[in-house]
Each structure stands twice: as structure tokens, then as C-alpha cells.
Amino acid sequence: MTASRASDQRDHPGGNNAGTRLRESQWWAGAAEQSCPLIRHADNHRRGRLRTVSTKLLESLRPTPVVKELRALTSEDFGSQYAGVAFLMVRIEDDAGALLQGLDAGAVAAATAEPLAFTTVIHSAVTRVASQTGAAYLEAHRIRLVRGNYYVVPLRKLSDAEAFSGRISVGRAHNKDVVLRDSSVSKFHGWFEVDGSGQYFYADAGSKNGSLRNGNSLAPKQLSRLDVGDELRLGSIEALFWLPGTLWDVIRRP
């Protein structure tokens, strides 16, 4: 054994010549104390970076009532406020004047609308999903958001919308629950449904330009299961499917 290696083993209690457990714990305590300033610095740097990211993410969202509450409410209060409600994150381009007008009008109506049934089940599922998300999962969603501007649309059944109480309709026509005023979107483009367990589905209504889920074309009038973070393309309109817990965590969670 070389002299340098023997010295390392004497200095580090994990070597073959380690002393008692007390010496070992004292050695690690000293090492931890020396590293604490670096850990605190790294932690403060990370928190500062996340505050900056959170600000940028909020700036990427159109300031609707949902976003204002997202800024102000705690995770629990936001989840309670939107229990049973999923969100469609509609991507907004610079020349989307007509699209914005339709979404703004829908936001006013949605403020007093009711979600579909099974609110308790959905809310518990939202809480469970949000609590299990890790840093990599949140970072992936944050990267997607900062690449564009989005309009947060709560999926609710409007009182003055067309029939089919178990469906949330999407289309260019003014009587749809989610109005997408774009020439690529059909008057009745598709609809959302939720089953007894709180699982959301989307179906294309046989639209002219069709619908995509995560890049895959959807067969007309057949329900497709939706998962948090799924990408939908209705005509040329891009959107993301999110739940309240995911939205709060991505924007606000440290």
C-alpha cells in the first residue's frame, strides 16, 4: 500500500483503518458543515431561477380570470376552485385576432358555467397526479410553455350551448362550449366527454381538417382517451390537455 493511500484511509473513516462509529459520524458531520454554504448557494440559485421561470411562464399565458387566480391562489385553493374541470391550453399565434375574440367571449360565459359530473373523483385524481410529478416532468412541460403563448380554456358545459349535456363541444360556431374562431376549424369540430371514473376523452366529429392526438390522426366519432400533457391539433390549432394540479405545479411549484 502506498503512503498516500494509507494517509487517505487514516483521514477518511470509511477506509480499512477507520476508527469508531463516533469518529466516523464526527468526520461526516465536519464534511457536511463545510459543504453547507455550497448547498445553500446552489439551493438559493435554483429557487431564484425557478422564480424567473415562473414569471416567464405566466407571461406566456393570456391574462384571463383563470390565470389571475393561478397567480393568487395556493395549490389547494386553486384545485378546489376548479374541482372537476380540465383545461385546454390553446396556443395563440401573433395574428390570432378572431381566435382570441372567440376565446375571450367564451371565458366570460365559462365563469358561471358548471363542469361535467364526477367532480369529487376528478379532484382526487388531480391531487394524486400532481403530488407524484417530479422535477424532470415539470421541466419538460415548462419548456413546452415558454416556446409559445397560450390561452387557458376551462372545459365546462355552457348553459346556452347546444344539446348533449354529457359533452363539451368544440368548434368554430358561436354555440359551441369551446369556440375556436379559425378557418381551419369546422363549425362542429369535436367534443370532450368524461366517464364515471373522471377519465376524459376526445372525439373528432367528422371535421373537414380532422384532429390529431400526439401527432396521430383520430378516427371520426370515436373516443380517444386523454392523458395529462397530451397534444391536440384541431385543424391548424394546437392545444395541450392539462388538469388543475398540473397547471399549478408547472407554473408555481418550486
Image (cartoon, grey):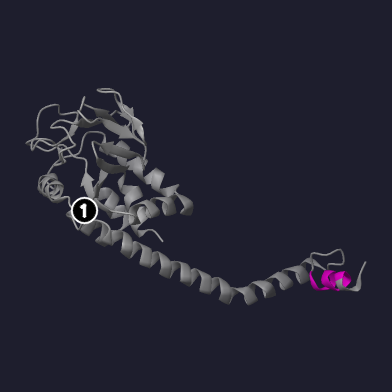
Q: In x, y percent, where is residue 166?
A: 19, 28
- Asked whether the viewer can see residue 134, the reply is no
Q: Is residue 44 above or below residue 197?
A: below
Q: Which residue is mark 1?
A: 66
Q: Quadrant of the C terminus?
A: bottom left
Left or right of residue 84, residue 176 in this image: left
| Residue 6 inside the magenta-drawn segment | yes
- State which quadrant residue 51 falls in: bottom left
Left or right of residue 108, residue 8 in this image: right
| Residue 244 inside the magenta-drawn segment | no
- Asked whether the viewer can see residue 66, the reply is yes
Q: In x, y percent, where is residue 61?
A: 25, 56
Q: In x, y percent, where is residue 75?
A: 32, 55
Q: Is residue 13 above or below residue 250?
A: below
Residue drawn where x is 31% and y is 27% of the image: 218
Residue drawn where x is 86% and y is 63% of the image: 16
Count every numbered label the image shows and give the total: 1
Q: Which residues are magenta?
A: 5-12
Task: Indicate the amino acid at tag 1.
Answer: Val
